[in-house]
Image (cartoon, rainbow, N blue to C red):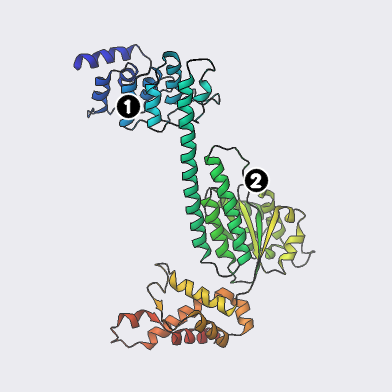
Amino acid sequence: MGLMLQSSLALLLSTMAQTPLHVSAGYNNVEIVKFLLNWRGPEKVELEAKNMYGETPLHMAAKNGCNEAARLLLEHGAFIEAKANNGMTPLHLAVWYSLRSEDCLTVKALLEYKADCSVKDNDGMTPLNHLSQGPGSEKLRELLHWHLEEQRKRKAIEACSETKAKMDELERELLNIVGLHELKQQLRKWAKGMLMDEKRRALGLKIAARKVPHMAFLGNPGTGKTMVARVLGRLLYMVGILPTDKVTEVQRTDLVGEFVGHTGPKTRRKIKEAEGGILFVDEAYRLIPMQKADDKDYGLEALEEIMSVMDSGKVVVIFAGYSEPMKRVISSNEGFCRRVTKFFHFGDFSSEELAQILHLKMNNQAEDSPLYGFRLHPSCSVEAIKKLIEKGTTLKQRQEMNGGLVDPMLANARENLDLRLDFDCADTNDLLTVTLEDLEAGLHSLSQ
């Protein structure tokens, strides 16, 4: 074995930038390949080392038809899709060898290890493209065609499975949104289209990139605008439209400076921070002065900075605010309606919807939530809580607070639970169960 290794090293000296594994694989010296692959010495054998042509040992075995050496390398985890400097994979080179020798064994070995038949080299050629039209290549062509079709079927099945899993994930997200049926349908439509595009690309089809429209969310505070923006961020990231799921929430004070020359840089910093995700501009109408003659207001400058990047595709912008004041924003800039093409109205929540939100919050408490570990008493049904809210609040109060009514109501209810219990209470159910009485007291405290 020592003499064989010395022989390999001698060959190495005459070959530029090649390792002993390159040489032994290229000459199908199976014993030396085994010895090197099992080597446990101080210098580790690099399975993916490249020579001056960017070829790995597997490339060397493939282009010389060294079937046994190729199989040994593959068994030890050699990267089957490694590309040489010319973009060729081991399968490209194995096809070249097969055309010269009419020996398909190495091609078959690579295909058994799922070598990609559709991968292209630097000239845009797949292994199939390298086959000549003359006699002698029919069997090789048939072999590659069969594996190419099998790979397409497998990719289609995998893409379908991934698509269904992502749609299921979206539906789970939508379960946490109460009401807003029109918006949820739009989210489903976008997700379906994006995922179908993802499937098309997985099958090697070339299609235009899909862009997500910029949006305006119109409605009173507490109607779920920020929450929906976060869900949208996760959706767009999930389907690969955005590189991150971050939602950067800003208001006027985050964008507008106090002096001349401050607003532009301040706004650009926030836009830069939001790149790759969503820029959520809350209370966007505050950027527009109430009086057109107010030339000391720099809000318009901030809006113009945001508008200037909306065609770049680097960020998705959502403007949010009350429906009526948002008309000032829409009419303030000629390009607004050209860039912002989707408008969604977030209606006020009914008493029943507020009760549903309360249930969702209690059933999905995060570990850092003040109510983590607590639960509702069975008597606290959606219908019972709905009646409680209708009785304990006015319509005006509900319209002003919407979903913002729920968190303080629950916080107050927990305080009432603590007040109601004795120190000697040892029943774990009693210690963790919020009752209808607690909710009523929590609502009363809120009204006060």
**Residue 14 relative to residue 125: left or right:** left
Quadrant in which the C terminus appears: bottom right
Camera-nearest residue between 383 and 231: 383
Tell me if I can see residue 241 in this picture.
Answer: no
Residue 10 is left or right of residue 221, and the answer is left
The image shows residue 271, relative to residue 351, as above or below, that is above
Which comes before the other along the chain, label 1 or label 2?
1
Q: Secondary structure at mark 2?
A: loop
Count of numbered badges drawn on the protein: 2
Q: Quadrant of the N terminus?
A: top left
Horizontal and vertical percent position of residue 192: 57, 53
Q: As shown in the figure, which amino acid type bears the numbered disc 1?
A: Arg
Q: Position of residue 389 (x, y in %)?
A: 55, 83
Q: Secondary structure at mark 1?
A: helix
Q: In the image, residue 100 lies at what x, y percent?
A: 44, 13
Q: Is residue 188 visible?
A: yes
Q: Position of residue 49 (x, y in %)?
A: 36, 26
User: Mark 1 Cα within 10 Å, few/some/many (few <14, many 20+)?
Assistant: many
Q: Residue at x 56, y 75 (%)?
A: 353
**Residue at image location 70% in from the left, 68% down from the top:** 323
Write down the residue under mark 2. Answer: 312
Q: Label 2 sits on what residue type? A: Ser
Mark 1 vs mark 2: give the one in front: 1
Most foreground residue, 128 or 284: 128
Mark 2 neighbour density, 10 Å: few (under 14) some (14–19) many (20 or more)? few
Q: Quadrant of residue 354?
A: bottom right
Residue that lies at the very extreme toward the right in this rendered image: 293
Question: Residue visible at 42% across and 16% down?
Answer: 102
3D distance between C-alphas at marks 1 and 2: 48 Å
Q: Which residue is mark 1?
A: 71
Q: Nearer the viewer, residue 128 or 341?
A: 128
